[in-house]
Amino acid sequence: MDLSDRTMTITRVIAAPVALVWGAWWNADSLPQWWGPEGFSCRTARIDLREGGEWLFDMIGPDGAVWPNHHRYGRVTPGARIDYALHAGEDGPKHADATALFEEVPEGTRITLTMVFNSAEEWAQAKGFGAEELGLQTLGKLAARIGAS
């Protein structure tokens, strides 16, 4: 099955070891501190970072707008991979299936985020509002959180 018309991939290399990058991501205290684009913050209702767990939170924009989010975690390979489904709010409709890959490279850690949207239309809508750039900003906040570039 060809998913190219509904798949978005975002990649960034962070100048830090995989263990440090993974530790900032897969940590219930740290994750909400950096998640989201520049100027956005998170308000967590509950967070359970484990295979089969979830993170229920609101993204709060610089203008105060609130976007409910619900990540449901599937397969987790510590230090290497996180699979999760992106939902609009608690038990809301699923937007996409996502994977975060962590790979050691000479420069540090390459993170590859892949999102497979439900349809080409949802992919186009996400691309249209700048999801790729916003995702890169989010990874930039992760790098800043751990003091790396």
Image (cartoon, helix red, strand yellow):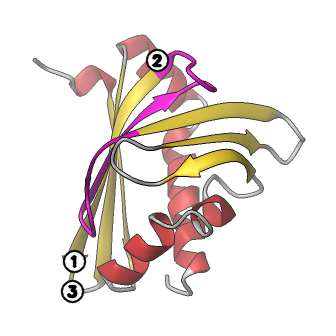
C-alpha span from label 3 to label 1: 7 Å
In the picture, measured across the screen, residue 88 lies left or right of residue 13, that is right
* 1 vs 2, front mark: 1
Q: Which residue is mark 3?
A: 106
Type of amino acid under label 3: Pro
Q: Residue furthest left?
A: 1
User: Which residue type does callout 1 highlight?
Assistant: Glu
Q: Position of residue 101 (x, y in %)?
A: 27, 58
- Give the residue at mark 1: 104
Q: Residue sitting at 46 percent across and 54 percent down?
A: 49
How many discs mark residues in the rendered view?
A: 3
Residue 19 is inside the magenta segment: no
Q: Secondary structure at mark 1?
A: strand
Q: Position of residue 82 (x, y in %)?
A: 32, 52
Amino acid type of the residue tagged 2 in the rendering: Glu
Q: Are marks 1 and 2 in contact (CB under 8 Å)?
A: no
Query: x%, y% of residue 58?
Result: 72, 39
Residue 15's quadrant in the figure? Answer: bottom left
Q: Which residue is the site of mark 2?
A: 122
Which residue is more in the foreground, 102 or 28?
Answer: 28
Q: Is residue 106 toward the left or the right of residue 65 in the image?
A: left
Left-right relation of 11 to 144: left
Q: What residue lies at 41% left-to-right and 82% top-to-bottom? A: 20
Magenta stretch in the rendered image: 73-94
Q: Few, some or many C-alpha atoms within 10 Å of disc 2 (few <14, some 14-19, many ≥20)? A: some
Q: Quadrant of residue 12?
A: bottom left
